[in-house]
Amino acid sequence: MLSEFTSLAPYLLAIAPAGLVCAALLLVLPRTGQRPVPLLRVIVHILFFVLARDAMTAHGYWQVAAGGLRFTAPPPILLALGAMSLALVASTCWLESEARRQIRWCGTLPLLSVLQGVAGAALIVALATGLKALFGLPSLPPVPASAWPLLLGFALAANCYEELLFRGLLQQQLRAWLPAWRAALASGLLFGLCHAFLATTVTQVGAPILVFTVIEGVVAGLVYCRAGLLGASLAHGLAIFALAAGWV
């Protein structure tokens, strides 16, 4: 197991230089000020996330195909990456304390937010399944049930960080200029655009990644309007779990 954790070192070293540049930018940019400054800080966080996510492909931690995805890292690595994602959630909330106070964490009732998140995931899965059937994309075989708990935990932890950035921070900042539905649409489209490099260069899968991530981002954005970050994180995380488990 120690050797498996050691294999995480090349990945961390690969993303460290850009991570240090992002950290320096966050030190230079003030935490408070006129509206463009907090939004620029959010963009820096998102750029680091895109770098860290795309680097997972080169290090063999996941494989993305036109018909699905697989998390191929050993279980200890997935656990470590999930813990890193939660640590990034905590550190981002600490760094962006002013923006954090504006986040819509859940809807009127937490249980209703959970149900809306599950419904959002079901909608994403249904749309993805329909599009795969329409364009004749192959499905990956289901993974063993014994792997489901680890996949579920990783999908929820990793995508909680993603939703904090794109919905809790970005979409909430856009609400200063846009109505709720347009902010949700903008955050969803930007979410898809942030997968363009992954789609066209890193994996060369192309349009299927962009179409799926735009659907996923827009649905999560709309769920955020009603169910807050709790619902959006569930919608995103459960949809990725279904895809990684081979259910889609």
Image (spheres, rainbow, N blue to C red):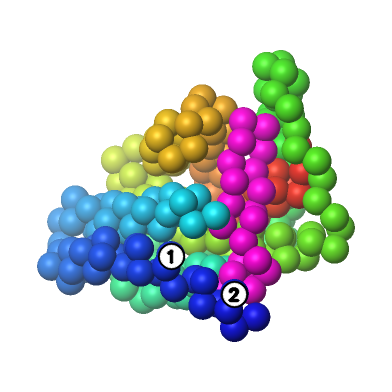
**What residue is rendered at 55% in x and 54% in y?**
60
Q: From what the image shows, is residue 216 above or below residue 26?
A: above
Q: Please give left or right for residue 159 compared with residue 196 in the image.
A: right
Disc 1 versus disc 2: distance between alpha carbons?
A: 12 Å
What number is the disc on residue 29? none
**What residue is rendered at 59% in x and 83% in y?**
2
- Residue 75: within the magenta? yes
Q: Earlier in the sequence, mark 1 or mark 2?
A: 2
Can you identify the residue that label 1 sits on?
A: 11
In this rendering, the count of numbered labels is: 2
**What residue is rendered at 61% in x and 36% in y?**
65
Quadrant housing residue 159? bottom right
The residue stretch that appears in magenta: 61-80
Q: Quadrant of the C terminus?
A: top right
Identify the residue at the far right of this view: 145
Could you say which is closer to the camera, residue 118 or residue 135? 135
What number is the disc on residue 4? 2
Q: Quadrant of the N terminus?
A: bottom right
Q: Amino acid at mark 1?
A: Tyr
- Considering the numbered disc 1 on the image, is that residue within a helix, a strand or a loop? helix
- Evaluate whether residue 151 shows in this view: yes
Q: From what the image shows, is residue 226 above or below residue 16?
A: above
Q: Amino acid at mark 2?
A: Glu
Q: Please give left or right for residue 110 compared with residue 176 in the image.
A: right
Quadrant housing residue 186? top left
How packed mark 2 is, by other alpha carbons closer than 10 Å (few <14, some 14-19, many 20 or more), is few
Picture coordinates of residue 161, whole percent (x, y): 49, 61
Q: Please give left or right for residue 49 compared with residue 143 in the image.
A: left
